[in-house]
Amino acid sequence: MIIDRKKFDLAMAKKCINLKELKDLAHISNSTITKVLAGKIPLQPKTLGKIAKALEVEPADLLQDEA
């Protein structure tokens, strides 16, 4: 699973929050979110769920479309 950065950025804009606020709302570390967004570590379902819940979107709404 890979987060679609454009969809992610749009969801953050809709919620009017920045990464620091997201990490606080999602209860995940800054390091984790940075590494996930950069593709340096795999996105775990639990992490995706926390991010989606904080952004008030469905988890699938944040993922890259499969080709």
Image (cartoon, helix red, strand yellow):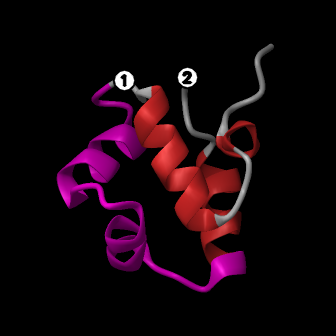
Q: What stretch is highlighted in magenta?
A: 14-41
The C terminus, quarter of image: top right
Q: In this view, does 46 lie to the left or right of 3?
A: left
Question: At numbered mark 2, what does the secondary structure look like: helix, strand or loop?
Answer: loop
Calculate the distance from the C-alpha at mark 2 to the C-alpha at mark 1.
7 Å
Q: Position of residue 5 (x, y in %)?
A: 59, 49
Along the line of sight, which residue is nearer the eye, 24 or 6? 24
Q: Where is residue 13 in the image (x, y as percent from the top left)?
A: 65, 77
Q: Residue 42 carries which label?
A: 1
Which amino acid, by three-letter code, is at mark 2? Met
Along the line of sight, which residue is nearer the eye, 4 or 28? 28
| Residue name at image x 42 percent, y 29 percent | 43
Which amino acid, by three-letter code, is at mark 1? Pro
Q: Earlier in the sequence, mark 2 or mark 1?
A: 2
| Residue name at image x 41 percent, y 45 percent | 37
Does the magenta segment cover residue 62? no
Q: In this view, does 12 lie above or below 40?
A: below
Mark 1: give few (<14), some (14-19) or many (20+) Cα within 10 Å: some
The residue that mark 2 highlights is 1
The N terminus, quarter of image: top right
